[in-house]
Amino acid sequence: MDLMQLRAMAKINLGLDVVRKREDGYHEVRMIMQTIRMFDRVTVYRIPEPEIRISSNLHFLPVNENNIAYKAARMMLESQPVRGGVSISLQKRIPVAAGMAGGSADAAAVLYAMNRIFYMGYTLEELMDFGLRLGADVPYCLMRGTALAEGIGEELTRLPACPPCYVVIAKPAISVSTRFVYENLRLDETTRHPDIYGLADAICRQDLYGMLPYMGNVLESVTIPAYPIIGEIKERFMENGALISLMSGSGPTVFALFDNYEMALRAKEALLEWGQVPLVYVTDLYRVREETPVNYW
Ligand code: ATP
């Protein structure tokens, strides 16, 4: 097998809390990660030349060593003596710099594909260790499904698949710097922390409605005052029948959950008619089949 074409799937955070700022500048987080059925198509194939070639359908993405998919490929090629190199093509559909881990998902796909193509023999855990050196979300992007993430995001505990529902994603035409958000996060006694363990319990009970009171994203306390459009999108979603609406990651993407497909479609139409959000998608959750924990890509 010299070629693999994979779906690198996006994530949303059903809950995101920052527990504390560490001495080393990192933030200790507690999050519920959920893969959604929105993906980049990542094609990886072996070439005889000892090179890494990369191309993308988005002209503004770097197609050199600054692309995280390139870094993943270089790490794999340097990890074992192999013959030849790789060509990587990224068909991006996950919005970039949106809080949906699109780059991390691409990197995870490259690690997974190269392990197979070059018969490197790494376990999923070993690939996750490589991934962590590329970014805190990469190990989760290899694992996929529903998971509790702690530490800096790398301490992962698989949860049962979240109860089925529909997800509407809205990406406003603004950029939000992750660094800005974390630097401006103030944690004190007034901070409203979502109850992430309560959320995990509700997922374990398969109680979609019971999850709702525990869901939240502590980073909204920074982004909504700075970018009011994020709060306005959440309000639009709630007016249009969402069970809940939250920002994903450090934003600016906002998602909403629906228990009814028609309502999800109507909410999408309402947001597009409003004219303030250029990108709105309806999708659903990606559920990992627990009986096939490794070869599920
Ligand atoms: P996260 O949720 O992990 O913070 P994100 O969705 O906010 O991720 P990405 O889309 O992964 O952000 O990309 C953030 C930055 O990384 C962009 O500025 C982009 O130029 C750069 N980048 C490098 N490689 C990629 C890639 N393969 N796909 C997307 N962005 C990439």
Image (cartoon, rainbow, N blue to C red):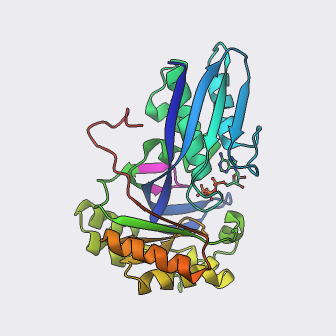
Q: Is residue 152 magenta?
A: yes
Residue nearest the viewer, comparing 275 with 193: 275
Q: Residue sitting at 65 percent across and 23 percent down?
A: 77
232 over 1 or under it: above or below: below
Using the image as rendered, state which of residue 39 and residue 106 is in the foreground. Answer: 39
Membership of 115 in magenta stretch: no
Viewer-proximal residue among 261 and 25: 261
Against 113, residue 109 (above or below) is below
Q: Which residues are magenta?
A: 149-156
248 with respect to 183 (left or right): left
Give the vertical position of 269 relative to 133 (above or below).
Answer: below
User: From the viewer's perspective, is 106 left or right of 67?
Assistant: left
- Please report the residue visible at 73 percent of the width from the left and 18 percent of the height from the top: 50
Q: Residue 114 occupies which quadrant of the picture?
A: top right
Residue 212: x percent and y percent? 34, 75
As drawn, 144 above or below 33? above
Question: Can residue 250 be seen at all in this image of the molecule?
Answer: yes
In what quadrant of the picture does the C terminus appear? Answer: top left
Q: Is residue 192 visible?
A: no
In the image, residue 282 lies at what x, y percent?
Answer: 44, 64
Q: Is residue 116 left or right of residue 179?
A: left
Residue at the (75%, 40%) spot, across then down:
63
Q: Position of residue 228 (x, y in %)?
A: 63, 84
